[in-house]
Image (cartoon, rainbow, N blue to C red):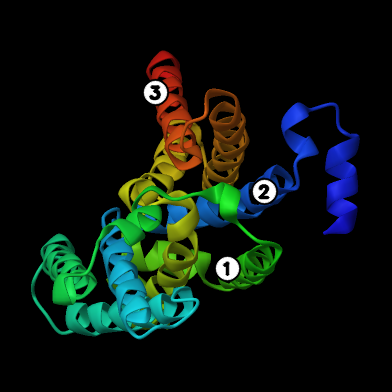
């Protein structure tokens, strides 16, 4: 981290003279490819609201961790979200209900359980506000290390399973005929998204987390001509919005997560207009 601080302090930018802003920038640079790749998996798999449901389950895990007096409830949230994702995959593989119906069932149950636990015994809900809004400026070097490990794991997962996930989402029967189990791919996918959502919830905020897992790929689909461009544009848009949103939040004093989300929305509008012009 010392080397990173030295590099940031050399740059002629006021906001990078502060160590916490350097931490936030590094977190953004790590989260951009993470959310960019995850976004393509979410949009292609038609699971746009699944990340929202996972966010609710992660909040429930955080509430359980706080009630139990655990110093860092994030890891409890990770375990709870992974268990939630695995249960969802199990129920989905054995149910005739559509995915959006099951997501609605799991999401509503998770948010109700989270609020119930958080307010148990008349407890105050205000201490959970940081998880609703997020604060990327509070990210620590240790958390950045965890984020780097998750990014590495997602990159490995993407290299080996991105084609399988795409085929399973587009044509499950064809995927099965080629020896790819849609259920296995779906389980690995939901587990990966669960970890990403849980780790990012305290930095981005539950209220807008879903937009960061939908907008990059949604904008990329407007301009991409093939699968490689689709993934590349998604990562690029996430990176641009992350840096631009961080700069905007610093100089205007706003929430970084909200600023990033709005920049992504602007990119989506521009890409949509470019698509209309190209057509």
Q: What residue is shown at x 84% (from left), y 49% (from top)?
A: 5
State the separation of the CA atoms marked 3 and 1. Answer: 28 Å
Q: Is residue 118 above or below residue 43?
A: below
Which secondary structure lies at badge 3?
helix
Left or right of residue 260: residue 83: left
Q: CA distance from mark 2 to mark 1?
A: 15 Å
Q: Quadrant of residue 41?
A: bottom left
Front residue (pair 116, 167): 116
Residue 138 vertical placement versus 226 (above, below): below
Is disc 2 placed on a helix, strand or loop? helix
Q: Estimate the x, y position of residue 269 in percent, counting from the top left.
A: 39, 23
Question: Measuring 31% from the left and 80% from the top, which residue is drawn there?
Answer: 67
The N terminus sits in image quarter:
bottom right
- Indicate which disc residue 269 carries: 3
Local packing at callout 3 (Cα closer than 10 Å; few below 14, some 14-19, many 20+) is some
Q: Are marks 3 and 1 in contact (CB under 8 Å)?
A: no
Residue receiving disc 1: 154
- Badge 1 element: helix
Q: Earlier in the sequence, mark 2 or mark 1?
A: 2
Between disc 2 and disc 3, whose residue precedes? 2
Which residue is more in the foreground, 129 or 162? Answer: 129
Across and down, in percent, residue 179 comes to 42, 83
Query: In what quadrant of the picture does the C terminus appear?
Result: top left
Q: Are marks 2 and 3 in contact (CB under 8 Å)?
A: no
Q: Report the mark closest to the observer, 2 or 1.
A: 2
N-terminal of the two: label 3 or label 1?
A: 1
Camera sees residue 193: yes
Residue under circle 2? 29
Question: Is 63 located above or below residue 204 in the figure?
Answer: below
Residue in the foreground of this view, choosing between 161 and 264: 264
Q: Residues within 10 Å of mark 1 (few under 14, many from 20)?
A: many
């Amino acid at each position: 981290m010392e080397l990173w601080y030295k590099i940031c302090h050399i740059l002629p930018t006021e906001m990078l003279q502060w160590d916490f802003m350097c931490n936030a920038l590094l977190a953004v640079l790590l989260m951009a490819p993470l959310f960019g790749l995850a976004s393509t998996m979410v949009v292609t798999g038609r699971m746009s609201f699944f990340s929202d449901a996972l966010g609710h389950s992660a909040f429930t895990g955080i509430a359980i961790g706080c009630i139990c007096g655990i110093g860092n409830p994030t890891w409890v949230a990770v375990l709870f979200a992974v268990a939630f994702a695995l249960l969802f995959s199990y129920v989905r593989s054995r149910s005739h209900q559509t995915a959006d119906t099951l997501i609605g069932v799991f999401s509503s149950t998770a948010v109700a359980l989270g609020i119930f636990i958080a307010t148990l015994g008349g407890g105050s809900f205000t201490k959970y506000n940081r998880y609703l809004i997020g604060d990327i400026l509070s990210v620590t070097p240790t958390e950045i290390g965890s984020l780097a490990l998750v990014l590495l794991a997602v990159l490995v997962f993407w290299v080996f399973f991105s084609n399988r996930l795409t085929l399973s989402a587009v044509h499950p029967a064809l995927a099965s005929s080629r020896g790819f189990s849609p259920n296995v791919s779906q389980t690995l996918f939901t587990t990966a998204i669960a970890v990403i959502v849980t780790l990012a919830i305290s930095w981005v905020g539950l209220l807008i987390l879903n937009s960061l897992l939908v907008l990059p790929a949604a904008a990329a689909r407007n301009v991409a001509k093939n699968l490689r461009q689709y993934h590349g544009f998604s990562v690029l848009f996430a990176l641009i919005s992350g840096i631009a949103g961080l700069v905007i939040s610093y100089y205007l004093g706003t929430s970084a997560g909200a600023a990033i989300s709005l920049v992504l929305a602007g990119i989506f509008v521009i890409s949509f207009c470019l698509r209309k012009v190209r057509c």
